[in-house]
Image (cartoon, rainbow, N blue to C red):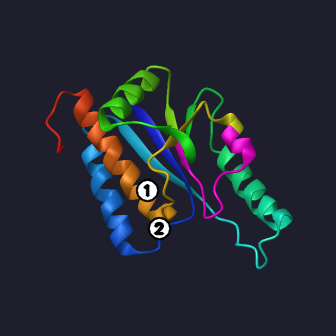
Amino acid sequence: MRAMLLCVGKLKEKYWRDACAEYLKRLTRYGRVEVVEVPDAPEPVHYSPGACEQVLRLEGERILAKIRPDDVVIALAVDGKAYTSEGFAQRVAQLALRGRLVFVIGGSLGLSPQVLERAQERLSFSALTFPHQLMRVIFLEQLYRACRIVAGEPYHK
């Protein structure tokens, strides 16, 4: 499997970086997984629709610049499809046959319409909203779990 986790913003706290590093280390057994960060745009002082659109547009341009034409793009979005761990594992295995998987986590305002249009799929881990730093850890753990399931290895239920 070849995969990229494309994220808006940096992990500032050491505990988030350590957790992500641990899952990335574990994932090396199953393929090449990289994390690519794009700078987040400053949050608007006043949350007007125009100011939010401008932030999303700028972050979206930065995201799209990292995606290749042949990438299979999966946007993490609240309105995406939810899977069980087993269902997610099967879907990842299917999509991995098509090329490099690029999973995208947006910033505090989400993802731009352009990024959502580029995505072949939208994936939801919950109807709840999570901080994007925590979502990285959750995603990498679930990707690791999916790889174990596909490999027929035991995993915590």
Q: Position of residue 1 (x, y in %)?
A: 38, 30
Viewer-proximal residue, 20 or 56? 56
Queried whether the magenta region covers residue 75, the answer comes back as: no
How packed mark 2 is, by other alpha carbons closer than 10 Å (few <14, some 14-19, many 20 or more), is: some
Vertical relation: 101 (above or below) 21: above
The quadrant holding residue 94 is: top left
- Disc marking residue 136: 1
What is the secondary structure assignment of the residue under circle 2?
loop
The quadrant holding residue 115 is: top right
Asked if the residues shown at circle 1 and circle 2 are in contact, with their CB atoms under 8 angstroms apart, the answer is yes
Residue for point 41% across, 75% down:
13
Give the mark nearer the N terminus: 1 vs 2. 2
Q: Amino acid at mark 2?
A: Leu
- Disc marking residue 11: 2
Viewer-proximal residue, 140 or 89? 89
Residue for point 67% across, 41% down:
116
Q: Is residue 76 visible?
A: no
What is the secondary structure assignment of the residue under circle 1?
helix
Q: Which segment did they paint magenta? A: 103-116
Vertical relation: 111 (above or below) 150: below
Viewer-proximal residue, 1 or 126? 126
Q: Amino acid at mark 1?
A: Arg
Residue for point 60% across, 61% down:
107
Q: Which residue is at the far bottom?
A: 45
Question: From the viewer's perspective, is 42 left or right of 27?
Answer: right
Residue for point 63% across, 63% down:
39
How packed mark 1 is, by other alpha carbons closer than 10 Å (few <14, some 14-19, many 20 or more), is: many
